[in-house]
Amino acid sequence: MSSWVPVPAGSDFTIDNLPYGVWSRPDGERRIGVAIGDRVLDLAAVSAAGLLDDAIPDAARVFGAKSINELMSRGRPAWSAVRRLIRELLTGDDRSVEPMLVPMSDVTMHLAFDVGDYVDFYSSIHHATNVGRMFRPDAEPLLPNWRHLPVGYHGRAGTVVVSGTPVVRPCGQRKPPDADAPTYGPSTRLDIEAEVGFVVGVPTALGTRVAADAVADHVFGVVLVNDWSARDIQAWEYVPLGPFLGKSFATSVSAWVVPLEALTGARVPQPVQEPVPLDYLRSTEDWGLDLAIEVLLNDTVVARPPFASMYWTVAQQLAHLTVNGAALRTGDLFASGTVSGPERDQRGSLLELSWGGAEPFELADGTARSFLADGDTVSIAAVTGTGPHLGFGNVTGRIEPAVD
């Protein structure tokens, strides 16, 4: 299917994609839109004209909101119906929505959804193995529980920010291995984590759980994530309770939320899991996703992590997240954890790329990096490797100096 809207060759935002976002003109109000090519379809205007009423009776209220949470809460039948109508509007002979298309160059993007809870997983076997080898060189790199459950931690929802938001270098306690006592100051080992995030639409009641096969009934869409990490702060504080201040200062997400339905063609079998997971972590469907990720540090591509290599899937992550009866809320975000592949140029963190700082790598301008310097810009992008071509835009952040 092709759209009558011009879509540049190689665009992330084809008619097969149609991701949702929240945008505004300068000094204007926030509005919900969908991306097509290099334009944004103003869904507030489309719904006000009554063109989405066949999908959602109160569409004008849903799309007149300042976030997509109300749409996400309506559930899978509504998501599919809205998507189908938008596709018809952008491919049929009736071009009545043409005046409702706005050039992307004229808009500012905002965080598309109000974040509920934020959970970050640790689901790449290659990343977990690399980290284990660095920090436990004389022991088995994977801890005993790793192959039995998707390890994760609860993050800070209030510091999830949209792509383009500057990231201020965090301060905290650090204690190098050779120091007698900790000191306080700006992180000197500021890092990235290239991840994929999943946004919950349909909530659940406290005390219930979501089966692995029901993931598509609850997950609305997918974003790119950069889970910024202060490795020196993290290393001193995380024993015995896990990540805290080393992770909670900023988590960046892409502005566009790609519907999970749009990624149907990118679904592939996941890697073989040994031992076989417990029953609640088993799914009758394939939930691996073939996404080719690219990480740029300033103007240099430093890594191309393959998401299809992830050991634990979105379905298993959601099943594990709720197996104890934890409730889901509309807008909950859970991320995959760092995506890394088996090769050096597939490592999704600077910690791995520089092997803990011992092996600095060179950028295109001739400078070397182990961790991030003030003024560095990191941009993470991804496209499908299987099925129709589509992408996520990018998630970008620039490092600003620590605040005195």
Image: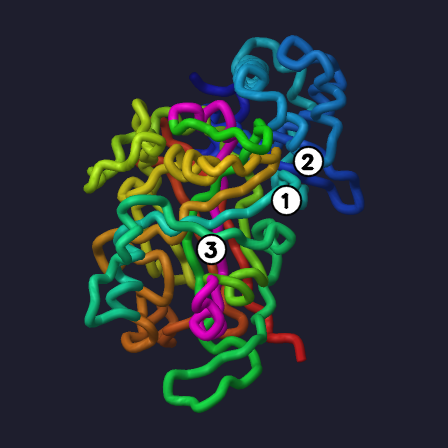
Question: Which class describes the residues within 10 Å of circle 2: few (<14), some (14-19), or many (20+)?
Answer: many
Residue that appears at 19% across and 71% down: 138
The answer to whether residue 11 of the structure is visible from this angle is no
Residue that appears at 66% across and 14% down: 56
Specify the amino acid type for callout 2. Ser
- Residue 80: image tag: none
Q: Which residue is mark 1?
A: 111
Vertical arrangement, residue 73 with respect to residue 52, above or below: below
Residue 92: give x, y in percent of width and height.
54, 11
Quick check: is 226 in the magenta stretch? yes
Question: Which class describes the residues within 10 Å of circle 3: few (<14), some (14-19), or many (20+)?
Answer: many
Specify the amino acid type for callout 1. Leu
- Residue 67: image tag: 2
Left or right for 108, reference 86: right
Residue 22: give x, y in percent of width and height.
66, 38
Counting every numbered tag in the picture gives 3
Residue 260: give x, y in percent of width and height.
46, 29
Specify the amino acid type for callout 3. Ser
State which region is magenta: 213-241
The answer to whether residue 283 of the structure is visible from this angle is yes
Secondary structure of the residue carrying tag 2 is loop
Q: Which residue is mark 3?
A: 379
Q: Name the foreground residue: 304 vs 249.
A: 249
Residue that appears at 31% across and 53% down: 340
> Is there CB contact under 8 Å for labels 2 and 1?
yes
